[in-house]
Image: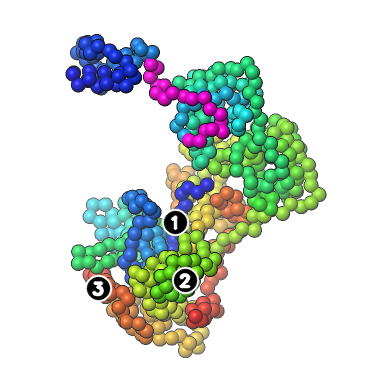
Amino acid sequence: MKELVDQISARLRDQKIEVPEEEIASRLKKLIEDFRVPEGEARRSVLNYFLKEHGVTFPARASSEKVKISEIAGPGRWVDLEVKVLDLWEPATEAISQTGLIGDGSGSMKFVKWTKSELPDLELGKSYRLKRVVTDEFQGRFSVKLNRTSQIEPLEKEVEAQLKRVQSMKVVEINEPGLWVDLKVKVTQLWEANSEAISQSGLIGDETGSIKFVKWAKADLPDLEEGKSYHLLNLVTDEFQGRFSVKLNRTSKIELLDVDVEVGSQAAEFAGALVDVQKGSGLIKRCPVCKRSLAKGVCSEHGKVEGTYDLRIKAVMDDGRRVQDVLINRETTERLVGLTLDEAKQMAMEALDHEVVRSLIEGKLVGRYFSVTGPRVDRYLLVETINEAQPVTIADVDELIAAMEVN
Amino acid sequence: MAGFSREVARRIFIEELKSSNYSFRDGEDQHQYAPQYLLTPTGAKCNRVFVVGTLTEKDDIGSDAEYWRGRIVDPTGSILIYAGQYQPEAAQILANIEAPAFVAVVGKPNLYQTEDGNIIISVRAESIQRVDEATRDQWIMDAARRTLERLKALWSAGPVSVSSDFSTADKTPASLPVQDGQRALEHYHTDVEHYRQMVIRALSSLRGDLSEDRSKPKAETATKPEAKVEPPLEAEKPGPRRSKPKKSSPLNAWPEQENEEEVETFNLGKKS
């Protein structure tokens, strides 16, 4: 008992609070002896009681300081911000009540408001003082989180902030979400848009690379055609797990270009052994809205959805010098493995296990030599053609033996 | 941007792989999660290897759980691979393959030192797949090309040159193979010619297989005596494999080699 009392008074003294030991002891005793509370719990309870008594709200361990967005340079800091809400996005999970982009004169940053925080919703375009928000970092980019101890105060005066406006970027230069950009691109692939919210999605590219685009139905824009080149104005960049995309919204414009835009990375090729077929290959389910693959029926962006089946391969190729991640779409997978989507579904149904499809693919591909071509997007090569390596000929061997001799 | 990147699977002929005895962890702080590498005599710094060869035998050597061991043979030698409960997919496939069969193995090289100081290299299989002979042929070519590249790096590094300036700045790729080569030379005093001969032997044996397939009986004259090196199926007696033909160099470059064979014969003893 004495020990517990000492611990508690020590903690209280840290907060510059002096409490007579008898008071602590009597509360403790009551909890432990009369109410059979375990010692650890009792200690916590008594400590919290006196902290509250003296006006220390417990979770606010760290004092927060008022900063500008550009001053945020590390995770885990408690800060106060005065910002304007620049953009609101659809939360990926129910744990998040709001997410989007906030800005002040110094810059802009992603914010996340947890559902548990039970904070009121922010309105687009309005300015607020956000108190005691926590900074966070993911892959070198910072964000702020609004949790239960955070506070939101509407501001009378408007905070000066704008989405950064950048004219005419190249695809490869897009490395930040929430930018407004203009691109001159060619549409290289159009994907089936399974959601009513999206009118079109697919891949666009210029000579520096390719990027995913999404055209919202609400944007009310004319359709893009595959193979045609366009000047796309006022797109907003977005990011998901380090990968970028651009969104066409109501303010965006589409102008058809007379010239044909070369898509640079189209030419990527790789030859080597296929050394791994990764999880998420084979028979998968995709979100009907955004086409992302589902994990246990849950889309990282749209939550629990009724998925649609697809067949694809995520594989690793390796030529002994470097590795290349490749993605193989349904058509190519069907041809390569000799298995249609329907057959794959049938197989999985009979085995009561989706993984049988992946095992089959592994058996057919792993350890073999292929050469692939296709555009490189991010760390993936999106396979357009895949061919098994030509059989070794005697001439090949002789050539190599000759190369061994000259030295 | 940077983050995790997968280790390349190196191509190394089995003879060279088994001649390796230098393993280390990379990174400034040598904590237990730093990746482990094996440096081979020609300077391949490998955390992972890719081998295609013939599975000649397999056993379940586990006592409680299944623990599968297999022997893989390429034109230069044979090596043991293992797959147990932590490689369930590989273990299952190995359990179901009937030897002999051509297999492709991706795995981590494993260095084990016996009580009397011998070093045994084996491969812990991450994946095993049955493949066809054409794939094995591809691999021999692949391994030969990569080995040739490493040998060239050794030639350019030169046997001594301790000068640590950037004199060999021939389009230095990612992992600075020149440096790895330098390190290999220091540790193994690598006899470059020996490994050149090894590659030529492997290629000649491949050439022999190919011309046999085409049933063109004349090609044989061209094949050098070394081409006799085991047709990789069945024959994998430890005996004649290496001590055979014009071995331009004495064995002093890999003293542990001989002992290692002995250790292996132990393991071999069990096979039918």
> Which residue was labeled with disc 3?
B259
Does the image show residue B142?
Answer: no
User: Residue flagged by tag 3: what amino acid is it?
Assistant: Asn
Pointer 2 chain: B
Q: Looking at the image, tell me whether mark 1 or mark 2 is earlier in sequence order.
A: 1
**Chain letter for the residue marked with disc 1 in the picture:** B
Residue B238 point in image, percent of width and height: 29, 76
Is residue A178 among what the camera can see?
Answer: yes
Task: Say if A266 sits above or below B189 in the image.
Answer: above
Q: Residues within 10 Å of mark 2 (few under 14, many from 20)?
A: many
Magenta segment? A56-74
Could you say which disc has been placed on residue A330 in the image?
none
Q: Evaluate if marks 1 and 2 touch, with contact meaning CB atoms under 8 Å apart.
A: no
- Mark nearest the camera among 3 and 2 is 2
> Disc 1 marks which residue?
B7
Q: Quadrant of the N terminus of chain A?
A: top left
Residue A222: image location, x then y, percent: 76, 38
- The chain carrying label 3 is B
* Magenta residue check for A99: no
Residue at image location 66% in from the left, 52% down from the top: A208
Mark 1: few, some, or many residues within 10 Å (few <14, many ≥20)?
Answer: some
